[in-house]
Amino acid sequence: MNFDMWAGNVFLSQKRTSSISAIIDFERSFFGDPLAAFVSALFIYDDVEKETDFIAGYNEVSKRPLILTYGDREKIILYEMLLYLRSYCETR
């Protein structure tokens, strides 16, 4: 899911025909914790741990069961705070 879709975030491949080869967002990209991706799911779900389809999809892609520890939940809350702070700053 990408909530910042504009021409600057789309790479095109121009071989015989044009096609999308990548979608990026450098503003919010960082090499880091996969748990940060859970914050985007908060736009759709109140609690991703209660969303069985979300968890099943995550488990299928990651090839391992999702087990969140207390520390993982704390990190997700911090990533959520970071998202809200960025959103607040962007609208001021």
Image (cartoon, rainbow, N blue to C red):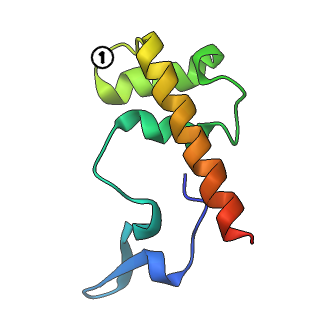
Circle 1 residue: 64
As displayed, is residue 22 above or below residue 57? below
As displayed, is residue 25 above or below residue 40? below
Q: Quadrant of residue 58?
A: top left
Q: Residue at x 42, y 17 (%)?
A: 71
The x and y percentages for residue 55 are 51, 20
The outermost residue toward the left is 15
Q: Quadrant of residue 3?
A: bottom right
Q: Of 62 and 69, which appears nearest the observer?
A: 69
Q: Of 25 and 76, which appears nearest the observer?
A: 76
Count of numbered marks: 1
The x and y percentages for residue 83 are 59, 49
Q: Quadrant of the C terminus?
A: bottom right
Q: Residue at x 28, y 22 (%)?
A: 63
* 68 to the left or right of 83: left
- Helix, strand, or loop for circle 1? loop
Q: Residue at x 37, y 84 (%)?
A: 18
The x and y percentages for residue 80 are 59, 39
